[in-house]
Amino acid sequence: MSLYTSLEDTTKLRKLILENPELPLLIFVGEEAWSDNFLYELAEVNSASIKALTVYGDYYVDEEEFEEKIADEMNNDEEYKNLSDEDFDKAVKNKIANEEFENAIVIYVG
């Protein structure tokens, strides 16, 4: 009997782990990964890669998503309402520059 796996070739994942043993392994699961019929279910692995992440609220986000969140926040702040687009973008970049991002091996499932 051969077991089905959505990650047919685990070479990439093994290589990421072996070459980066100091990095944490984070697994993010989408809501479509669980049908609510069983306690545990096999789900599709979408990707495995090294990503730079930070925490925003209660969530891990990459730099692009963090920039979007910060820009949205600042867009609603009176302090930044009268800035030109160029100055606003600079202010966003300054806030992002002060944020710490950590590399992790990230697996997306679902």
Image (cartoon, helix red, strand yellow):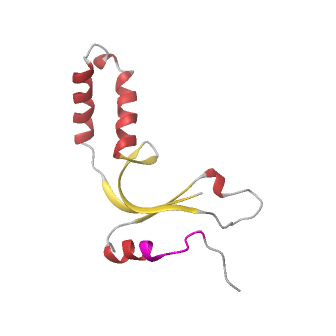
Q: In which image quadrant can residue 110 be found? A: bottom right
10 inside magenta stretch? yes
In this rendering, is residue 28 above or below 90? below
Residue drawn at (22%, 34%) of the image: 94
How far from the left and from the top, in percent, is residue 99?
27, 44
Q: Is residue 75 left or right of residue 87?
A: right
How far from the left and from the top, in percent, is residue 87?
22, 22
The one nearer the camera, 51 or 22, is 51
Looking at the image, the residue that sits furthest to the front is 9
Image quarter hosting the N terminus: bottom right
Looking at the image, the residue that sits furthest to the right is 37
Residue drawn at (75%, 64%) of the image: 38
| Residue 106 appears anywhere in the view | no
Q: In which image quadrant can residue 77 be found? A: top left
Q: Is residue 88 left or right of residue 45?
A: left
Q: In which image quadrant can residue 83 be found? A: top left
Q: Is residue 91 left or right of residue 7?
A: left
In this rendering, is residue 38 above or below 83? below
How far from the left and from the top, in percent, is residue 28?
51, 57
Magenta stretch, overall SS: loop
Q: Over which residues does the magenta segment extend?
A: 6-13
Looking at the image, the residue that sits furthest to the bottom is 1
